[in-house]
């Protein structure tokens, strides 16, 4: 069995689908009052973050390394692929059954696998994403945040820092989501969107300022979380709102100047930028809710879930789907057609296929994600088990399933479309 970068990308998307189904089941079970197995939560969270997003990032970096390699035959990464997915499954299993030491060992194996690719990953990040809008030091900090977040994640199950467990958990989550994932997502959008729209970014200077403001804001926000300084956090939140507003304005001005027709890749990347703004605004207002001793709105786990999924589905998953929609046709063409000159028609064919029904996954996932916020807001005036909340839950869950299923169907169709297909 030869495991190429494409294998990592497909497996990562498969983990995202599994995690999405686990999340939908958890949401429905919560509202319906149905007891669910303990392992479902780590399937949803760590299946999405480790098996899904981290593996997709690894696959993308391996694909970039293979493209820059002088070797005509792509290398096989079978041992890495099998080890990574076994370690991910073991981590989820041990988390589900609360096996602390075994969880730490599985996390240690994953950390070792990431470290084994660290030199390649760091070099590819610098070469692929560094540019006018993303200075190299930003990528260095983001990569450092990934390693620091993983280190803390390995240390927690072993009980190495019990007196600071709450702070360590907060640092683990925010280093990985804000320090690494969000910053890499912004860099990917700045890198891909001009290529998708076939026009230079409206303002590279604004893009660079936005990137540096988000880096500084993310680091300051992490410090505010660790010191529990709410007013400082809100001040940084206002800065991040301003940066995100300039970010999305710059993206839309670029889109308006584009000579190209709409595409699935461009749609997903633009919507990702909007959701980043929504997420920061929502998080800032949730913090402002606690400025007084008596909060205006009670915030529970469902509200926090709605907020985090704006970032995870609305921003990160849309960045991933935009990158796949743009990069997969070229990747498949390079694997299936040896002659460079003959690839262009096949790339155009696959791009057209992925652009079909492009509104279906976009609308399904976007409205489904916003539906989570609607459900959370409804609990302020309706009981959790009321007919209105249950109806909204099933609608939101259905939209999310339709969105993911529609993209999975297009992906399967593209994978099955051979260059010699008579219908081509």
Image: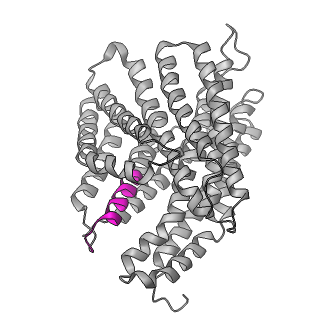
Residue 238, relative to residue 417: is it above or below?
Answer: above
**Colour scheme of this structure image?**
one colour
Q: Which residues are magenta?
A: 55-72
> Residue 203: image x %, image y %?
64, 47
Q: Main secondary structure of the magenta part?
A: helix
At horizontal 51% and vertical 40% (from top left) the residue drawn is 182
Q: Is residue 237 visible?
A: yes
Residue 289, relative to residue 269: is it above or below?
Answer: above
Quadrant in which the N terminus is drawn: bottom left
Task: Write down the quadrant of residue 78 in the picture.
Answer: bottom left
User: Is 195 a magenta residue?
Assistant: no
Q: Is residue 26 left or right of residue 390?
A: left
Which residue, as the protein is rendered here, is positioned at the far bottom? 422
Quadrant in which the C terminus is drawn: bottom right
Task: Write down the quadrant of residue 206 in the picture.
Answer: top right
Residue 338, relative to residue 405: is it above or below?
Answer: below
């Amino acid at each position: 069995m030869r495991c190429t970068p494409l294998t990592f990308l497909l497996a990562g998307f498969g983990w995202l689908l599994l995690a999405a189904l686990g999340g939908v089941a958890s949401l429905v079970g919560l509202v319906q009052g149905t007891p669910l197995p303990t392992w479902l939560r780590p399937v949803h969270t760590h299946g999405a973050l480790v098996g899904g997003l981290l593996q997709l990032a690894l696959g993308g970096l391996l694909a970039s390394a293979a493209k820059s390699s002088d070797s005509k035959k792509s290398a096989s990464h079978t041992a890495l692929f099998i080890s990574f997915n076994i370690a991910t499954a073991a981590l989820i299993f041990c988390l589900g059954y609360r096996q602390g030491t075994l969880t730490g060992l599985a996390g240690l194996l994953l950390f070792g696998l990431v470290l084994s690719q660290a030199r390649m990953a760091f070099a590819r990040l610098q070469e692929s994403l560094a540019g006018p809008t993303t200075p190299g030091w930003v990528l260095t900090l983001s990569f450092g945040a990934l390693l620091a977040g993983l280190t803390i994640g390995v240390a927690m199950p072993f009980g190495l820092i019990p007196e600071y467990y709450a702070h360590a958990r907060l640092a683990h989550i925010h280093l990985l989501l804000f320090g690494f994932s969000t910053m890499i997502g912004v860099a990917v959008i700045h890198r891909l969107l001009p290529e998708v729209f076939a026009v230079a970014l409206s303002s590279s200077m604004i893009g660079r300022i936005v990137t540096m403001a988000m880096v500084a804001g993310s680091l300051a926000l992490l410090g505010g979380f660790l010191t529990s300084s709410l007013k400082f956090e809100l001040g940084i939140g206002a800065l991040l709102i301003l940066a995100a507003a300039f970010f999305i304005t710059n993206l839309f001005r670029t889109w308006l100047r584009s000579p190209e027709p709409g595409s699935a890749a461009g749609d997903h990347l633009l919507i990702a930028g909007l959701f980043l703004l929504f997420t920061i605004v929502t998080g800032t207002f949730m913090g402002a809710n606690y400025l007084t001793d008596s909060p205006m709105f009670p915030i529970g786990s469902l509200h926090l879930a709605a907020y985090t999924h704006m970032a995870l589905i609305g921003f990160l998953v849309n960045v991933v789907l935009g990158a796949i929609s743009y990069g997969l046709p070229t990747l498949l063409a390079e694997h299936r057609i040896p002659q460079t000159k003959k690839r262009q028609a096949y790339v155009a064919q696959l791009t057209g296929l992925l652009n079909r029904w492009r509104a279906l996954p976009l609308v399904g996932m976007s409205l489904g994600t916003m539906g989570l916020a609607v459900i959370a807001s409804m609990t302020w005036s309706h009981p959790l088990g009321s007919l209105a909340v249950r109806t909204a839950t099933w609608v939101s869950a259905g939209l999310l399933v339709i969105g993911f299923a529609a993209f999975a169907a297009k992906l399967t169709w593209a994978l099955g479309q051979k260059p010699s297909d008579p219908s081509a």
